Image: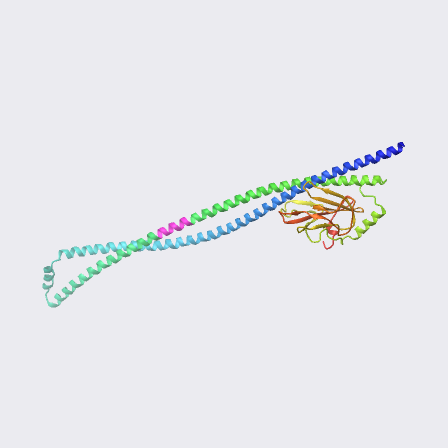
Amino acid sequence: MLRYIFSILFIVSTTFSWAQEEDRQRKLEEQKARIQEEIRQKERLLGEQKKKEKNVSKVVSQQKAKIGLQQKLINITEKQKKVLGNSMYINQVKVNQLRKDLKILKEDYAAMIEKSYKSRSEQSKAMFILSADNFLQAYKRAQYMKQYSSFRKMQGEEIKGKTDQLEQYQNKLGTQKKEKEKLLAESEKEKQVLENERLEQERLLFRIKKDKNKIVAEIRKKQKESRAIERQIEKLIREAIAAANKKAGNTTNTTTFVLTPEAKELANDFRSNRGRLPWPVEKGALSKRFGRQPHPLEPSIMIESSGIEISSEKGAHARAVFSGEVSEVQQAANGTATVVIRHGDYITTYSNLSSVNVGKGQKVSTKQTIGTIHFNNFTNKAVLKFLIYQNITKLNPQSWLINM
């Protein structure tokens, strides 16, 4: 009787211990799920920052190209200013020469007028002609008087013409000076505007990089926490193996399942199908590999992936890759679920499910639908996280699935 009571107490205590372990594992899984969701949120933010950075970098690059073109334009303007300056110099020389010529012409013309004034009477002109010694001399004097009058008229017209020319060149010089000042003002203004835009874009790029660095640091922190949770879960798996083996009467092995003949056969079948297992989704693409690798959004971050991630379309279903028994269905704090299926001493897990079609203890067959993959409206993808264990050892799913 006493022996029977001890047996009952042992079973109760064992059951209570198992319940505690399951509760601890469930809480850890929920904690891990929360951290993973936070990581995904940070990655979304990082993606946004990368897009902003890319866009701003593109704008900055375009702006620099624009500044380069503007600089070429400014160089052309400088050449125009130089050509304009040369033309202004030539025009100024002409103005100076015209002024000099006008001065001489005006002086000569003034002397001529003065002389003409002194001998302006018709009587004087007649006396000048009549006082000639002979007819030929008188004719020459008459012609001289006629030529003198024409020359005076021509000289007056030349003075007027040169005065008009001088005014034209002075007006042209005034227009050229204004044009030069306008070119200078426009060039300086455009150069300043472009420089201000470039500085503003660089300040924006600096702020985005600063924000990105902050997000990167947070992602690293959360990944560190996630790895710590994974280590605790692996510890619980070892404890669960030890407890299961103890219950089966084997207390020497605490890291591998003690298999029944049926379980051993199932494990052998699973192993023999390595490289030929169907994908856990009907349609999909590998979006994250197994093991250590650069983060897809930020190569400076190295991540450690315990399994693989497969991206699929909205409404995609997860399916068992091999026949086995559902050993656990875990609900995470973010509303998603993980299904754990045991195949002898092999375990496959299917995470990020929005709904589940199977329950704990249920037998499943190869390619049987076990749930619907959660669809993320932000990324427009349904991503399944798939892991394979043998006892407590993580395996690379890429070497087990067909055509991977």
Viewer-proximal residue among 25 and 113: 25
Viewer-proximal residue among 399 and 368: 368
Left or right: 312 in relation to 390: left
Which region is colored magenta?
176-186
Residue 285 position, x and y percent, is 68, 52
Q: Indicate whether 37 appears above or below 162.
A: above
Residue under the point 82% across and 35% down: 12
- Residue reaching furthest bottom? 136
- Residue reaching furthest right? 1
Residue 91 position, x and y percent, is 33, 55
Residue under the point 84% across and 48% down: 262
Q: Answer whether residue 308 is visible to the viewer in this image.
A: no
Residue 299 position, x and y percent, is 63, 47
Viewer-proximal residue among 231 and 169: 231
* In magenta segment, residue 382: no
Residue under the point 77% across and 37% down: 21
The N terminus lies in quadrant: top right
Residue under the point 79% across and 36% down: 17
Viewer-proximal residue among 334 and 144: 334
Q: Answer whether residue 164 is visible to the viewer in this image.
A: yes
Left or right: 97 in relation to 130: right
Left or right: 404 in relation to 161: right
Residue 33 position, x and y percent, is 69, 41
